[in-house]
Image (tube, rainbow, N blue to C red):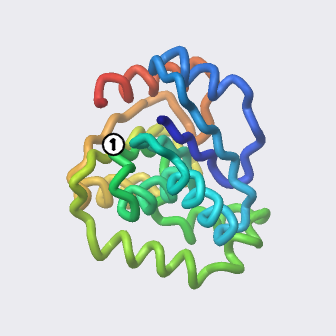
């Protein structure tokens, strides 16, 4: 099963699950749009993973990429994480967004998750980073440093910003397919 986790403050995009099914030949796709309350989102995502009978591959965008990496470490049935423009330095990324009040209220939980990820960088499961080099929301050097620590693969897109359209998403999915 494939679990796609949206970024902070995302609106549902009906083309994302359709594109995932088409491009990655997936029958089971769960599309989770963050509710922007970190504790509630983590609870919901953990429940989805716990209830799944299948192994899971996580794809997360921005904050969803940060959460995908976190959940990869918690569950043996999660076999890979693909992080698109992830906000590994989540507090800094959210500080740039005035709508992040609910996430920032849970700053101690964010710090706890960031510390947990720092404590066990090495993962038995693959981690891949897909980074738009025109990203204005996340710290690109920090992300690349994090990926080196995780021993993950890094794919760079010189003309891609933080957000992506259907064409940009299809381009990323071709690399995700190649890395699976």
Quadrant (top left/top right/bottom left/bottom right) for the C terminus? top left
Looking at the image, which residue is at 26% across and 49% down?
125
Depth order, front residue of 51/111 = 51
Q: Tell me the element at label 1.
A: strand
Looking at the image, which residue is at 58% across and 52% down?
48
Depth order, front residue of 61/51 = 51
Q: Which residue bears the numbered disc 1? A: 128
Looking at the image, which residue is at 47% across and 37% down?
132
**Residue 76 pos. (x, y %):** 33, 56
**Residue 6 pos. (x, y %):** 63, 45
Does residue 16 appear left or right of residue 81 in this picture? Answer: right
**Residue 152 pos. (x, y %):** 25, 48
Say which quarter of the image contains residue 82.
top left
Does residue 22 appear left or right of residue 72 in this picture? Answer: right
Looking at the image, which residue is at 31% across and 47% down?
127
Say which quarter of the image contains residue 117.
bottom left
Which residue is the extreme one toward the bottom?
108
Depth order, front residue of 116/74 = 74
**Residue 38 pos. (x, y %):** 65, 68
Can residue 121 be seen here?
yes
Badge 1: how crowded within 10 Å, few (<14), some, or many (20+)? Answer: many
Can residue 168 be seen here?
no
- Is 98 located above or below residue 76 in the figure? below
Depth order, front residue of 67/79 = 79
């Amino acid at each position: 099963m494939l679990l796609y986790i949206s970024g902070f403050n995302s609106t549902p995009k009906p083309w994302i699950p359709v594109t995932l099914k088409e491009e990655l030949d997936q029958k089971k796709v769960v599309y989770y749009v963050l509710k922007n309350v970190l504790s509630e989102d983590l609870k919901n995502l953990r429940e989805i993973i716990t209830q799944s009978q299948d192994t899971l591959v996580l794809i997360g965008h921005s904050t969803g990429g940060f959460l995908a990496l976190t959940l990869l470490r918690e569950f043996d049935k999660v076999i890979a994480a693909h992080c698109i423009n992830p906000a590994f330095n989540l507090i800094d990324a959210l500080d740039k967004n005035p709508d992040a009040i609910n996430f920032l209220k849970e700053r101690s939980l964010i710090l706890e998750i960031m510390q947990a990820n720092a404590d066990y960088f090495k993962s038995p499961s693959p981690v891949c980073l897909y980074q738009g080099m025109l990203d204005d929301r996340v710290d690109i050097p920090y992300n690349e440093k994090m990926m080196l620590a995780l021993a993950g693969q890094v794919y760079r897109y010189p003309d891609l910003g933080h957000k992506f359209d259907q064409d940009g998403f299809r381009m990323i999915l071709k690399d995700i397919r190649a890395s699976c």
